[in-house]
């Protein structure tokens, strides 16, 4: 139901992003999608990867503050209003989207990564509305 | 274990011994040390004027500046031939301060350190690893001879090559660690990285830490790393006075017992120089009454503490000096507010989400001081609001203690500098402008 996002704290300093990517490359962990927002001091790098556990272990060994976060990978049909529809279920249930970013865009579908407050409730809610969620295995087989 | 009978003498006995030794010392320096004689003449004081211990207060003070002015041997009370050891403290500003020892001085020093080691729980059964840098610094050799004299097995591993230090600890069964608090933290951290839990996999149960202030927060941090059952004590000394061995904490952790048969402590008002009544807080002044080569009289330590004369639960009757809040030399003045780095340390170490390492940076912009503190995340975080909440929490706690706003810089683990000797966690960049 959930997939594991790798969340890495990086100082807003030259070369830090590069360092993270180097560590993952060394471990042969491939990146499927990522999101990076920053403040003036630091940023949180969020990654969907082929092997989040191995990525976290390698990053921690290299002195990075890295953790795994449960997020939802939501499959969206390529139709106008599809995202809006999903968000309306979430809003009506009084849940908040903490952040989201694109997972992939291929063939006739787009998909997104969502972090929604009260993840279990959100997942149940989306499933009951017949919204498809990718599993960790799906991520490996479809996208990696 | 109480090492020497002098530690349990009655107040009358201690004072009688102190007076006898004080008179002898004053007479000797008046005769042998020209700068002392001049100072005493300027103050209109003769050795015969010392009739009671209270008369100590009529003698002039000695400061670090006097030592610099008389570099290298001008304050020595013995001919150079009588010296058997010379140490010097690193002079970051100006000339270093030089200290010398006769054979008898070294014996007294060794005795003093054996006493403070015994206060800190050491016995002849200990395997004592000295992770202080050997060299001109008095800390390593002081502890070395004091512990060896006690019959402990010495491992003089000095600083550096931390992995190997840990290997020795494991393979030799080290039970006692001598290090600065920051190096003790570093050793613990490296041990963890090597897959060794210092609390479980090592036998170190005694920590004699020094050369750097031990805050209570740091003591707690030491316990977290090295185990709750480790006895971590701090001790006090400075090379000018002898080195380590002036005073030390016993297992009751209620101040540091002064070796009063060798040193007389006084507390003065640092502004007026007036002696304060027992129990009041002020600058610590120490007179060496049983040293041959360099018997400093009324040396101004610049350290702020108070003296506690009530006998201790441990059975010792010697006066205790309260653990220091900070050293005056380390004090920062930020936007007109006096700040001890140790106050900042106490706050930071009390926050679980950040690690025990930190750096304090003070800069000046538009005629205003800016206090910035770098800390490392100890727990991974995956949301901006959590990072912001953490920053806010640190800021608020600092504001309560310091009355100042600080800028907090969160960083990844292992990014800040680690120290093997005395930590240098403060960067005051205002002086360079
Ligand atoms: Zn005691």
Image (cartoon, coloured by chain):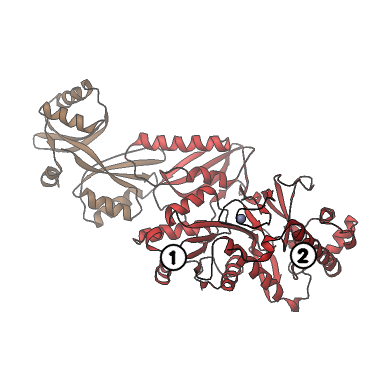
For residue A16, above or below residue A114: below
Q: Residue at x 38, y 60 (%)?
A: B200
Q: Quadrant of residue B92?
A: bottom right
Is residue B416 visible in the rendered image? The answer is no
Query: Residue B424's x, y, as percent?
Result: 54, 54
Q: Is residue B150 left or right of residue A116?
A: right
Secondary structure state at the residue bearing disc 2 = loop
Disc 1 designates what residue? B162
The chain ID associated with circle 2 is B
Q: Which chain does the red colour mark?
A: B
- Determine crowd level at label 1: few under 14, some 14-19, many 20+ residues with C-alpha closer than 10 A: many
Q: Quadrant of residue B203?
A: bottom left
The chain ID associated with circle 1 is B
Q: Name the foreground residue: B188 vs A49.
A: B188
Secondary structure state at the residue bearing disc 1 = helix
Disc 2 designates what residue? B70
For residue A119, above or below residue B256: above
- Determine crowd level at label 2: few under 14, some 14-19, many 20+ residues with C-alpha closer than 10 A: some
Q: Name the foreground residue: B17 vs B184.
A: B17
Number of marks in the rendered image: 2
Which quadrant of the figure contains the N terminus of chain B? bottom right
Q: Is residue B191 left or right of residue B366?
A: left
Q: In this view, does B364 lie to the left or right of A125?
A: right
Q: Residue at x 17, y 32 (%)?
A: A123
- State yes or no: discs 1 and 2 in contact (Cβ < 8 Å): no
Is residue A54 visible in the rendered image? The answer is yes
Q: Are marks 1 and 2 on the same chain?
A: yes
Q: Nearer the viewer, mark 1 or mark 2?
A: 1
Query: Residue B324's x, y, as percent?
Result: 62, 50
- The shade of chain A is brown
- Picture quarter with ligand 1: bottom right
Mark pair 1, 2: CA separation: 39 Å
């Amino acid at each position: 139901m959930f997939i594991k996002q790798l969340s890495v704290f990086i100082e807003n300093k030259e070369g830090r992003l590069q360092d993270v990517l180097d560590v993952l490359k060394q471990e042969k962990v491939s990146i499927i999608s990522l999101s990076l927002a920053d403040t003036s001091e630091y940023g949180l790098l969020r990654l969907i990867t082929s092997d989040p556990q191995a990525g976290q272990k390698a990053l921690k060994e290299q002195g990075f503050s890295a953790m795994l976060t449960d997020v939802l990978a939501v499959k969206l049909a390529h139709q106008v209003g599809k995202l809006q529809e999903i968000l309306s279920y979430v809003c009506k249930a009084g849940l908040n989207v903490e952040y989201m970013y694109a997972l992939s865009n291929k063939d006739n579908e787009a998909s997104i990564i969502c972090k929604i407050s009260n993840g279990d409730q959100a997942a149940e809610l989306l499933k009951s509305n017949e919204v498809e969620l990718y599993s960790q295995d799906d991520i490996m087989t479809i996208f990696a | 274990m109480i090492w020497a009978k002098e530690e349990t003498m009655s107040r009358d006995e201690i004072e009688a011994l102190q007076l006898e030794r004080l008179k002898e010392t004053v007479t000797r320096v008046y005769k042998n040390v020209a700068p002392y004689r001049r100072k005493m003449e300027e103050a209109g004081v003769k050795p015969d004027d010392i009739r009671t211990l209270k008369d100590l207060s009529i003698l002039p003070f000695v400061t670090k500046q006097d030592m610099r002015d008389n570099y290298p041997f001008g304050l020595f009370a013995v001919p150079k031939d009588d010296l058997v050891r010379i140490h010097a403290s690193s002079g970051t500003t100006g000339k270093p301060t030089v200290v010398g020892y006769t054979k008898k001085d070294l014996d007294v020093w060794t005795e003093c350190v054996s006493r403070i080691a015994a206060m800190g729980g050491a016995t002849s059964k200990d395997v004592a690893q000295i992770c202080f840098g050997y060299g001109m610094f008095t800390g390593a050799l002081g502890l070395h001879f004091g512990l060896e004299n006690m019959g402990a097995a010495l491992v003089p591993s000095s600083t550096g090559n931390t992995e190997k230090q840990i290997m020795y600890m494991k393979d030799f069964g080290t039970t006692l660690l001598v290090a600065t608090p920051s190096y003790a933290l570093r050793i613990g951290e490296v041990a963890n990285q090597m897959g060794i839990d210092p609390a479980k996999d090592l036998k170190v149960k005694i920590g004699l830490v020094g050369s750097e202030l031990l805050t209570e927060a740091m003591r707690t941090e030491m316990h977290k790393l090295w185990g709750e059952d480790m006895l971590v004590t701090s001790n006090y000394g400075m090379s000018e006075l002898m080195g380590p061995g002036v005073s030390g904490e016993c297992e009751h952790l209620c101040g540091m017992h002064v070796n009063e048969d060798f040193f007389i402590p006084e507390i003065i008002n640092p502004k007026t120089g007036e002696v304060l009544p027992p129990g009041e807080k002020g600058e610590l002044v120490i007179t060496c009454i049983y040293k041959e080569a360099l018997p400093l009289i009324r040396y101004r330590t610049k350290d702020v503490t108070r003296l506690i004369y009530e006998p201790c639960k441990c059975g010792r009757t010697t006066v205790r000096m309260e653990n220091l809040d900070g050293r005056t030399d380390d004090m920062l003045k930020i936007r007109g507010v006096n700040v001890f780095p140790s106050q900042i340390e106490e706050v930071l170490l009390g926050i679980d989400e950040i690690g025990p390492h930190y750096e304090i940076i003070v800069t000046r912009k538009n005629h205003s001081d800016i206090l910035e503190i770098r800390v490392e995340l100890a727990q991974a975080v995956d949301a901006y609001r959590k990072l912001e909440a953490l920053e806010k929490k640190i800021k608020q706690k600092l504001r309560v203690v310091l009355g100042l706003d600080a800028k907090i810089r969160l960083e990844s683990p292992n990014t800040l500098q680690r120290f093997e000797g005395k930590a240098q966690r403060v960067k005051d960049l205002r002086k360079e402008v």
